[in-house]
Image: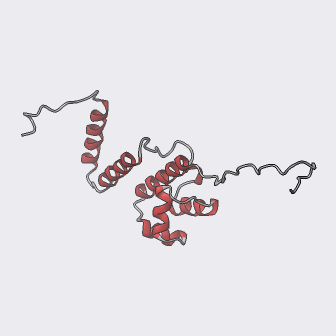
Amino acid sequence: MPKDATGGPPSAAPKRTKRTGRNPEFEVALGARIRAARIAARISQTDLGVTVGISYQQVQKYESGVDRIAASTLQGLAAALGVHPGSFFDGEVPVPSGNIPQVRMAMRIAEAVQQVRDPLVTRRLLSFVEALAEAKHPTIDSDETT
């Protein structure tokens, strides 16, 4: 029977855990901040990708938090969007919290509002949404929906 370095029986090797260094919550939040900055800059994923030298599919992966972003790529994205790279980490760009479907819905709402060209309508939409958010738990009477 083989012996270990101490002369005793071989010890069982410790179980190794694969260290990926990934933090999915952080990557999703970072991606959401990049997406918010891109939408605010009114740049498509394709145009952003071309500017940075990556495909639009890669931009999608970064924005959804599927792939990690290298520091040099993050700097390129920030430059293309006209923001400081640190803005993706501090509180400048709010990131919706909650589950991914809710974040996606919030982003769809933001994209739709970006299409409104009348500033008065935009302000009224904001007031309306803020009023909805302040409401405790509005209920709809079934008679009013018909």
Q: How many numbered markers are drawn?
A: 0
User: How is the structure coloured here?
Assistant: secondary structure
Q: Which residue is found at the position 42% from the left and 41% from the top?
A: 98
Q: Which residue is found at the position 49% from the left and 69% from the top?
A: 49
Foreground pick, 41 / 22: 22
| Direction from residue 127 to residue 12 in the image, left or right | right
Q: Position of residue 88 (x, y in %)?
A: 54, 50
User: Residue 112: which quarter of the image?
Assistant: bottom left
- Up-down: is 59 above or below 111? below
Instruction: Name the quarter where the N terminus is drawn.
Output: bottom right
| Direction from residue 11 to residue 111 in the image, left or right | left
Foreground pick, 25 / 63: 25
User: Residue 45: which quarter of the image?
Assistant: bottom left
Task: Pick out the residue farthest to the front.
Answer: 1
Q: Position of residue 13 (x, y in %)?
A: 76, 51
Instruction: Name the quarter where the C terminus is drawn.
Output: top left
Q: Which residue is found at the position 12% from the left and 31% from the top?
A: 141
Q: Position of residue 42 (x, y in %)?
A: 39, 60
Q: Position of residue 54 (x, y in %)?
A: 52, 71
| Direction from residue 141 to residue 78 in the image, left or right | right
| Direction from residue 26 to residue 121 in the image, left or right | left
Foreground pick, 138 / 126: 138
